[in-house]
Amino acid sequence: MSDPYISAIICTYNREQYLGSAIDSLLKQDFSFYEVIVVDNGSSDRTREIVEQRLDQSRLRYVYEPVNGLSVARNTGASIARAEILAYLDDDAIASPVWLKTIYDAYQNNEQLAVAGGKVTLLWPEGIKPPSWLSSNLAQNLGAYDLGDTLVYVENPGWTPRGLNYSLKRAFLEKVGGFNTNLGRVGKNLLSNEELQMTELALQQGWQVAYLPDALVVHQVAPERLERSWFFRRSWWQGISECYREQLSGDAGSVQLLRGSERILRGIYKSLKHFRNPALRFDNLVYAYGQIGYLGAALQGMLKTSKSRLDS
């Protein structure tokens, strides 16, 4: 196979029930010059077997990365990829047939494009409907992402493309030193914000970030993610992730205590305000709970900084 125009990368950890569908969706793309790389990030299930069942496809490659962490796995995938465009698909997602072509065309049409991702819709488990307490905002925690049906250049990092449907230009990724391994999921923890940080860096350096509506991906919702406890846990880790991102960008210290406290009060107030609306009530309660994780991480950071100063 000649050098591919785009490298599609799946980083996976113990997702045997979904992985096959993700790989198959990539092997059926309406595009010719691409490769598929599966990075097994220390799985203990049938991950390797599932990939090996499909290795008769010459464009598919398997690599084992024993150091756990999504950012580590993404960097490993990038290091062995042969193309200049890197497209990341989650192991529980299904790409539409034109996914890679849409992404490739976007980069070909814009030399300033550093990051791009597309629309994400949700596929609910069979026989299960979205619960009444799930707001459209909280559905974004399940991966939903929709900025409309036209191309959008993202200027607010908060609207950055979702990591489950995500691509970068290799030149940009190498310039910023790869994905920051202090952010991103590790094992069962739900650290995040690595994509948000990438968008911040891209915009600061004069690159562009795009939402591509036709680069559609469907995200399979695991049944356990429809428990209220999952959303509290997800929000807790989101708070920690936001704190870490601010620390990495130099925006940390006592100001974080003020931010976190104000957000907790705001979340509780709005939860009470919307008491009769189960979706908005739960949404704001989850938001407030996440700020406790944020404050805990901020205090740990301040204590660590103080200790370092005393030791020096």
Image (tube, grey):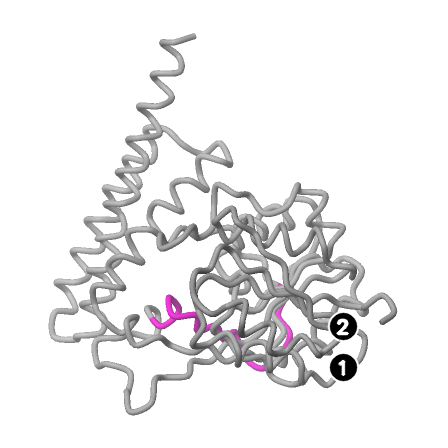
Residue 232 vertical placement versus 151 (above, below): above
Spot occupied by residue 176 in the image (x, y as percentages of width and height): 66, 42
Nearer-the-camera pick, 300 or 261: 300
Q: Is 296 left, or right, of 202 in this rendering? A: left
Question: What label sits on residue 148 in the rendered view?
Answer: none
> Callout 1, which amino acid?
Phe
- From the image, tell me which residue sits under label 2: 34
How many numbered marks are there? Answer: 2
Spot occupied by residue 310 in the image (x, y as percentages of width and height): 36, 9
Which residue is drawn at the image coordinates 65% and 50% (left, top)?
A: 202
Mark 2 Cα shell of 10 Å, populated few (<14), some (14-19), many (≥20): many
Which SS does the magenta portion mostly show?
loop
Q: Quadrant of residue 298?
A: top left
Whether residue 149 appears in magenta in the rendering, the answer is yes
- From the image, tell me which residue sits under label 1: 31
Q: Is 68 left, or right, of 58 in this rendering? A: left
Confirm or deny contact between disc 1 and disc 2 (CB under 8 A): yes
| Farthest residue, direction right | 2
Spot occupied by residue 143 in the image (x, y as percentages of width and height): 43, 70
Mark 1 Cα shell of 10 Å, populated few (<14), some (14-19), many (≥20): some
Which residue is drawn at the image coordinates 63% and 58% (left, top)?
A: 63
Nearer-the-camera pick, 157 or 125: 125
Spot occupied by residue 262 in the image (x, y as percentages of width and height): 25, 44
> Callout 2, which amino acid?
Tyr
Q: Quadrant of residue 11?
A: bottom right
**Range shown magenta:** 139-153
Nearer-the-camera pick, 120 or 52: 52
| Farthest residue, direction bottom | 127
Q: Quadrant of residue 134?
A: bottom left
